[in-house]
């Protein structure tokens, strides 16, 4: 209710889209913030609602059709960080806590499944990956292959967007 009150107090008709994003995973607060607030925003203001996520939601909420729940709450777009063309590179770059070891494909498969599920629910799905310059990479592993990431995204029913990396050298 506090977030809803704050949103209403700052709402401006010029807003084109409401985005759930931030430092950390936006869908950690799925049941207490994202779903109820999305429903209120869509019913009251009829604005486009987009979620930015790492796609680990299948691990957080096993057995639920989160893509359908998001669609039913009024979410129309979702941006999911695909980040790599295979699970080994994904694990090296993203370092998911849930993996057993670097060869564990489970988290990467959850991400791809979530992209597919969102596409099946007719959400506008964008899969993304960072284009990391070679001088920013650690010498013992490759940067993501953006062309391969795009192929995977499109095969899963998503539009692909390349993100630019501006940070320090990866360690």
Image (cartoon, rainbow, N blue to C red):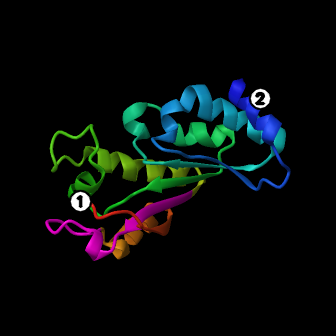
Does 26 sit left or right of 170 as displayed? Answer: right
Residue 71 in which image quadrant: top right
Expressed as whole percent of the image width and height from the top left, the position of residue 150 reads 41, 70
Instruction: Determine whether label 1 and label 2 are within 8 Å by CB.
Output: no
* Residue occupying image coordinates x 15% and y 44%: 101
Residue 65 appears in the rendering: no
Residue furthest front as drawn: 168
Residue 81 on the magenta span: no
Could you say whether the residue bearing mark 1 is in a helix, strand or loop?
helix
Q: Which residue is mark 2?
A: 5
Q: Is residue 21 something that shows in the picture?
A: yes
* Rendered-image quadrant of the N terminus: top right
| The label number, if any, that marks residue 55 in the structure image | none
Q: Earlier in the sequence, mark 1 or mark 2?
A: 2
Q: What percent of the width, then of the height, locates residue 97?
A: 27, 38
As measured in the structure, the alpha-carbon distance from the residue carrying label 1 to the one carrying label 2 is 42 Å
Q: Residue at x 53, y 31 (%)?
A: 29
Residue 49 x, y percent position in the rendering = 67, 48
**42 or 96, which lies in front?**
96
What secondary structure is found at the residue carrying circle 2? helix
- Residue in view at x 15 percent, y 50 percent: 103
Image x and y of residue 140, in percent: 13, 66
Q: Is 136 covered by the magenta stretch?
A: yes
Q: Label 1, on which residue?
A: 89
Circle 1 crowding by C-alpha within 10 Å: few under 14, some 14–19, many from 20 = many
Q: Is residue 122 left or right of residue 168?
A: right
Q: The C terminus is located in which quarter? A: bottom left
Q: Which residues are magenta?
A: 125-143
Q: Nearer the viewer, mark 1 or mark 2?
A: 2
Could you tell me which residue is drawn at 39 percent across and 65 percent down? 130
Dot 2 alpha-carbon crowd within 10 angstroms: few under 14, some 14 to 19, many 20 or more: few
């Amino acid at each position: 209710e506090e977030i809803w009150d704050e949103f209403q107090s700052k709402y401006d008709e010029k807003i084109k889209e409401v985005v759930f994003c931030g430092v950390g995973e936006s869908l950690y607060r799925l049941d207490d913030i994202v779903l109820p607030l999305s429903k209120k925003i869509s019913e009251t203001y009829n604005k486009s609602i987009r979620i930015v996520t790492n796609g680990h939601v299948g691990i957080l909420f096993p057995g639920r059709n989160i893509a359908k729940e998001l669609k039913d709450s009024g979410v129309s777009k979702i941006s999911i960080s695909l980040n790599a063309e295979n699970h080994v590179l994904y694990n090296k770059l993203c370092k998911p806590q849930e993996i057993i070891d670097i060869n564990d494909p489970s988290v990467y498969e959850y991400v791809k499944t979530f992209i597919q599920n969102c596409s099946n629910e007719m959400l506008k799905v964008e899969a993304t990956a960072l284009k990391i310059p070679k001088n920013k990479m650690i010498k013992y592993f490759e940067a993501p292959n953006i062309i391969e990431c795009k192929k995977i995204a499109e095969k899963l029913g998503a539009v692909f967007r390349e993100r630019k990396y501006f940070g320090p050298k990866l360690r």
